Image (cartoon, coloured by chain):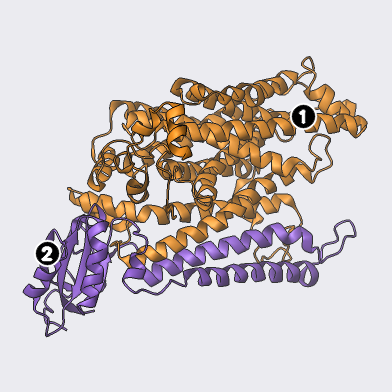
Amino acid sequence: MAKKKFVVGCFDTEDTLFPAVKKVRTAGYKIQDVYTPFAVHGLDHALGMRETSLHTAGFIYGITGTTTAVSCISWIFTKDWPLDIGGKPHFALPAWIPIMFELTVLFAAVGMVLTFCYICQIAPFVKKHHFHPRATDDLFVMVIECTDKTNTQEAEMFLQNAGAVETKTEIAEDGWWIGRYDKDEMPFDKNLTLA
Amino acid sequence: MSLKYESQLREPLVYGNKTYHQVTEDIIRPIEAKPSKLWYIGFYISVALLLFGVYSIYRDVTYGIGQWNLNKTIGWGWDITNFVWWVGIGHAGTLISAILLLFRQGWRTGVNRAAEAMTIFAVMCAGQFPIWHMGRVWMAFFVMPYPNSRGPLWVNFNSPLLWDVFAISTYFTVSLLFWYSGLIPDLATVRDRAKTKLRKHLYGISSFGWTGSTKHWQRHESLSLVLAGLSTPLVLSVHTIVSFDFATSVIPGWHTTIFPPYFVAGAVFSGFAMVQSLMVVVRKVFGMEDYITMGHIEAMNKVIVLTGSIVGIAYLTELFMGWYSQSKYEGYTFWYSRANLFSPYGWSYWGMMACNVVSPQIFWSRKMRRNLYVTFFMSVLVNIGMWFERFVIIVTSLYRDYLPSSWSVYYSPSVWEIGFYAGSFGLFFTCFFLFAKYMPVIAVAEIKYVLKISGESYKDDMSAIENKEAGEFAHEFAH
């Protein structure tokens, strides 16, 4: 966790956002992220992000659920306590299919949601820096990460020319911290050195 | 969630000349405003019902379920009827949010959030009935398989009643996760608009520090899509398993292979009716006619007439099989205990037929589908009919068993049975009122997503083409 300097450009429509993303990337600026009020399709590709593999994780959790169900039930009903139910086979696989299915879904769903929260680093009481309060309302907020060589004024001008309706330069915390949204202080407020 | 292209001829999903900000304003305003008098009245009535239910359950626990009028043959009465009824109602939420998402139905965005909430509350209500029916409810945890000091004596994994435990608890968990993960970005919107400290703090906690980062949105989309893919077979499995509670038994009237699809169709049917009842009121009270449009109401009415007719075919098939099987007992159950109006419970069968099969046919007319009063009246009627369906299935199959000496006295519920049912309504509506007050009833981010694809002001003006004479139109486009 460290504070960094960012140049922020706000766009009010996707129509200006997409060309701007392209321009900013070709100009060689490093886009830290674009904060949008809803899922803008194709923006992840425009920013050069790779596909998420969350669904692969979901598949692994799912088969873990199936395996758990079938191994537990078969152990219980054939080894640990074989119940005689009208002389029927102890290994009654067809009758276990409902529970195997339910556990598959349960494991996949719970696992995926927890993984989602973990990789996005979101949880209750977690606080992050918000570059613009309207990023969850109607603005598409592009954040450019500055290096030592970045001329912030130039970068702001560049964003304005690309169609940004509002620009600013901010020094902000990049990561998350435990905090409350009604209080501004951060546990490491005194550390103002730039990384 | 991608709805890449929509025909310009289609009715817009969002009316009015909206901007993104306007969408936020419209949907979040009711959360920020003081609740209206109507809200308080409704909320207090719900809480009163809930308290009555709590007292009924208190009686049930302290004196035992002898407080109910269950008797020698009717061991499942109102409680299991209500259980199946509530589970069924829950299904519409998942159907709207999951199946319609996979089918790329854009109109789901207007109603999915409230319908998902409804699912969760309905499943909560449903769960109460089998739990308190156990009587010695402090031993309810015996249904969970865990190593214990009683042997270990395990639960019976071959029993549909245990499948139910897994199905309902999984369904509740997955619906809750699906609903809440969708809600996080919208709660962040509420948080960033909050004026008071308390709101900032509470919505800050509940929105998990959501920022709207593109990477997070990409994962969020993937999560929603996979959860939808998981929920679709899940929702079908849940009511299938509920129907197994009946279908795997050898009771005439229950022992039928048609039960799983018939139960699922019935569940969707009653669930959509409940969504209609709630949405017709919500759109009026919160002034959300631009988002929950006549098009939405009509689409849901179409689902109602479709599923109602499927259920109707199932009823007729059952009657046919009752005769065709030439089984004395099946024939007796279907043709005497049910279809004979003058048998002790014949009235419930014909009540069910009238509400579920005959009356929804009114929705073949477009005018009726788009009439709010008819829609509301029908939605209530359908839920009454679907309650009767479960009552018919349970009571008419049980009241005369193979031993005539145990044929029971006429079963009518005790006040505590009714109280328990009323209490479940109290629980459902208390939760729903709180939800409508403190959370966005419409998925804000999803509406913003469809706004430019299907918002009224973003659609091409087709009136010039639509107003053309047919001949003129044909002439122009033929060449």
Quarter of the figure with residue A181: bottom left
Extreme-front residue of the structure: B479
Quarter of the image where the C terminus of chain A is located? bottom left
- The three-letter code of the residue at mark 1 reads Leu
Colour of chain A in the image: purple
Residue B229, percent from left and from top: 55, 57
Chain of the residue under the numbered disc 2 shown in the image: A
Q: Distance between the residues labelled 2 and 1?
A: 68 Å
Colour of chain B in the image: orange
> In the rendered view, would you say A40 is above or below B269?
below
Between B115 and B128, which is closer to the camera in this rendering?
Answer: B115
- The three-letter code of the residue at mark 2 reads Thr
Disc on res. B316: 1
Disc on res. A167: 2
Residue A57, percent from left and from top: 51, 72
Q: Is mark 1 on a helix, strand or loop?
A: helix
Instruction: Answer whether residue B402 is visible to the viewer in this image.
Output: no
